[in-house]
Image (tube, rainbow, N blue to C red):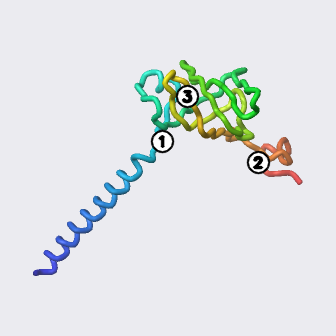
Amino acid sequence: MKPKQQRLILGIFAVLAVSGAGFLALSALESKAAYFYSPSDLATSDVEPGKAFRLGGMVADKSIIREPDGVTMRFVVQDESNRQSVVFKGIAPDLFKENSGVIAEGSLDASGQFIATNLLAKHDEKYMPPKLDGKMHKTGEVSQ
């Protein structure tokens, strides 16, 4: 076999190996992937109850209700045009509050209520540690 033919066969084998590895990785991740929906996406799509996904949006103003058991809370996630009620049982992150961004992981129950198993609170990109808050000059340098 000529060196040119050997390189061609090796190249074809390498492409097939990389394609096969990619296919195996995607098929393994498909069952673990959690899709992200906003309340508007959820209203227009047909998500089956029990299927895990992520719901993201803003926590509606005055919507957080804490149950007497101390660990269950109900709240509403909203976007520009739709709202979705959520039930979460557990300890909420410190940054979780009304009028703040949230991503809830969970699934819909048969009645259409979102049952969250995990909450991820989104923080403001303009976060400043408490000791430095208000002590920055317009140049961006920290005063001592």
* Quadrant the N terminus occupies: bottom left
Q: Amino acid at mark 2?
A: Gly
Horizontally, residue 73 falls left or right of residue 131, namely left
| CA distance separating discs 3 and 2 | 43 Å
Name the element at disc 2: loop
Q: Residues within 10 Å of mark 1 (few under 14, many from 20)?
A: some
Which of the numbered marks, if any, corresponds to residue 34?
Answer: 1
Name the residue carrying label 3: 114
The extreme left residue here reads: 1
Q: Amino acid at mark 3?
A: Phe
Please provide percent x and percent y for residue 111.
51, 21
The extreme top residue here reads: 81
Name the element at disc 1: loop
Who is closer to the viewer here, 142 or 93? 93
Who is closer to the viewer here, 110 or 118? 110
Return the disc, 2 or 1, that comes first in the chain's sequence.
1
| CA distance separating discs 3 and 1 | 14 Å
Q: Nearer the viewer, mark 2 or mark 1?
A: 1
Point 76% across, 48% down: residue:
140
* Quadrant the C terminus occupies: bottom right
Which of the numbered marks, if any, corresponds to residue 61?
Answer: none
Horizontally, residue 121 falls left or right of residue 48, namely right
Please provide percent x and percent y for residue 70.
76, 32
Please provide percent x and percent y for residue 24.
33, 57
Point 69% across, 27% down: residue:
99
Name the residue carrying label 2: 140
Horizontally, residue 132 falls left or right of residue 120, namely right
Q: Amino acid at mark 1?
A: Ala
